[in-house]
Amino acid sequence: MNKFVKIVIALIVCLAVGYSASMVTRPSVESWYPTIEKPFFNPPNWIFMPVWTLLYIFMAVAAGLVWDKIKEQNEEVKKALLFFLIQLILNAIWSYLFFGLKNPMLALVEIMLLWLMIYETYLKFVKINKIAGYLLIPYLAWVGFAAILNASIWWLNK
C-alpha cells in the first residue's frame, strides 16, 4: 500500500470520527449552547466546522506519513498510531460529554486528558517523521484554546 492510500484511509477515519461527533454537537448548538453564558473570546459558531475539517485533514496526513514508515520502524510506528487512535477516540468523546450530556465540567477533565494524549502523539510522530509531528501543532494549539474556552464556559455556568 502506498503513502497516498494510507493518507486517504486515515482521512476517511478522521472525517468519520468528526462526522459522528457532529451528529451529537449539531442539535445542542441549535438548542442548549445558545442559552449558556460564554466568554467574550468565544468564536462564532460558523468557524468550528472549517477549522475542525482542516485539523482532521492535517491529522490524517500526519497519521499517513507515520504509517508509511511501518516497515522501517515497526514498533515505534505501531505505538505512535495507537496513541493517535486513543486521542482520536478522546476527541469524539469530548463532543458527547460537552454537547451530548451538556456537562462542561466532565468535558473539561476529558479535554485535559485529550490535550496530553495529543502532545504524546506529537512527541511520537515527530521522532518518526518531523512533518507529521509539525502537522499536529495546530491541532494541539486549537485543543489548548478549546480547553480554555471549555473551562470558561464551565466557570460562567456553574
Image (cartoon, helix red, strand yellow):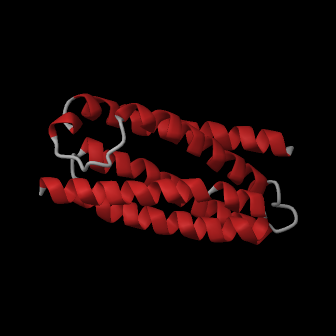
Residues 81 and 121: in front is: 121
Q: Residue at x 55, y 37 (%)?
A: 53
Using residue 45 as the reference point, say whether residue 118 is left or right of it.
right
Nearest to the observer: residue 100 or residue 33: 33
Quarter of the image holding residue 73? bottom right
Return the x and y of residue 57 as percentages of the image width and height: 63, 41
Relative to residue 122, is residue 151 drawn left or right? left
Quarter-of-image position of residue 113: bottom left
Residue furthest front in the image: 40
Q: How many marks?
A: 0
Quadrant including the C terminus: bottom left
Above or below for 67 versus 25: below
- Which of the image's four quarters has the N terminus? top right
- Percent position (x, y) of residue 102? 21, 46
Q: Position of residue 4 (x, y in %)?
A: 81, 40
Residue 145 is left or right of residue 98, and the answer is: right
Residue pictured at 20% horizontal, 30% vertical: 31
Does residue 104 sit above or below 30 in this rendering? Answer: below
Q: Residue at x 57, y 45 (%)?
A: 55
* Percent coordinates x, y for residue 64 in the rendering: 74, 49
In this view, the residue farthest toward the left is 158
Give the residue drawn at x 55%, y 54%.
139
Left/right placement of residue 103 relative to residue 94 reads: left
